[in-house]
Image (cartoon, rainbow, N blue to C red):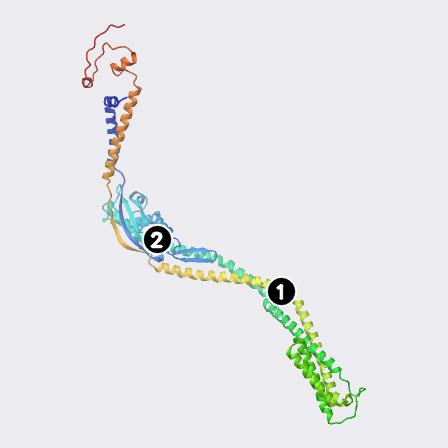
Amino acid sequence: MEFVEYYKIIRRRVWIAVVMAAITASVVVAARLMPKETVQPAAGRLLVHEVAKRQVEVAGYELRLGPPADEDLFWNDLSHFVHSTAILQRAAADVGIVGGEVEEQLAHAQAHRIEGSNVLEIVAGAKEVGVHPVNPNIVTAKDLAVEICNSVMEQLAEAWRTRQVARVQIARETLLERILPLREEVRRLQDEADKLAAKHQGRKPTDVLEGLSNELSTVETEIVTAEMSMGTAQARVETLHGVPPAGAPGLAREGPVAAFPRVAALQNAIVEKQIELDETRSRRTGAHPEVRALEAQIELLERRLSEIGQGEGQVTAQASLPLQQAAIEAQTSVAAFDRQLELLRSRASEVREQLPSVREDARAFAQIEGDLTTAQGALDTVEANIDRLQAEAEQVQDATMVEVLEPAVAQRIARGVGRFAMQLGVAIFAGGGIGILIIFVLHYIDFSFQNEQEAEQMLGVRVLAGIPRSDVALYAAEPEMPPEEVRPLE
């Protein structure tokens, strides 16, 4: 089908498209002209101080008190608060609107933060339909919107203060509920610690354990020292016992008396050097210079004793008396060291017997003391946080939450002429399109012959005559057909 044929189909019923376009345009115009409820806005600006942004959070025994962790979350919370029914009702009551007239005459306030600042823009409005003045100063919806916006900004400061104080009070009550169990826990742990300390004459088991451990270490060191000293004394006894006693066989009682003191002195010196050599060998090796020097000194003393003594017969009983006295003293030292060792070993045994029970008490006491320290620390933290909350409540009560930077000013309502024109144009085009669609639908469901050509095409015979169309204009517009020769029907 060619474009001309489409044109003819549309032209034949073009009135349908015109009617549909007119209907849709009428609907848009009627919607525009119908009375409707609109809101007259007014806007003002508030400065939000830092004290209004302080957050109070209790986590366990800890308290977080300070600036908000998330700025966006705070501003969203404040915006929702401004939009709340409580603020609307307080502002309405401030201007004299109460009861059911609040929702009829007023719209909820909106709040928007000025990007990157602490300034909050407040937009509140009054409805144009059904506005009833509540005082002589309020004549129009614009006046009411300004009064409501100013009232919202004034009421917001006190309402937000009340909310902050309530949050602080809730946090304080929460901590007060948690402080009682903490005090009971501290008291119970302290009693258990006192019972364990009472078993050790009021001393802490940990201190007793430390004292016993140190004492055992000291006693063991003293035992080792005493054993070494006793070994040295024993060696001295053995060395001195090697000197023949007075009156022993083989001792010559003759000789010059003047030589006896020198012989005794040399023998004593030899014994002392021998004892010193034994002590040195217990600490040094045989090749050590100190050991070799003592051996050389002993050898020299023995050679001099041999020269002075003129033989064994001159070592008389008088010469051996100092040595016998030294041997007695050495034996006395051995006995004293033996007694000291006995006492030290006995004390070490007593300490070892006490250690298991004291160690068990010390372990339990350390656990209790750790729990007590933790509980006491938590208790101190809670008490300090309660004091902080009390100071915070006093600060919130006296501080300025928000401050009015710009009083409310009525805003212009955009009439939307351009939008209306666009809507009207879209409606006309849409109505015309629907009309054209209807025209084609009617055309395709109409099974009658539209002209002679369609009849000849469908029937396969020529048309001899026809009834003229009433649409003279349409008929006249069609080109005249040249007369054709009439042929008889076959």
Label 1 to label 2: alpha-carbon separation: 62 Å
- What residue is shown with label 2? 159
The x, y position of residue 257, in whole percent, is 75, 94
Position of 344 relative to 433 (above/below): below
The answer to whether residue 27 is visible is no
- Identity of the residue furthest to the right in this view: 249
Q: Residues within 10 Å of mark 2 (few under 14, many from 20)?
A: some
- What residue is shown with label 1? 359
Secondary structure at numbered mark 2: helix
Chain-order first, disc 1 or disc 2: 2
Task: Name the side, left or right, on which 62 lies relative to 249.
Answer: left
**Image quarter of the N terminus:** top left
Quadrant location of residue 64? bottom left
**Image quarter of the C terminus:** top left
- What number is the disc on residue 67? none
Marks 1,2: beta carbons within 8 A: no
Which dot, 1 or 2, sits closer to the camera?
1
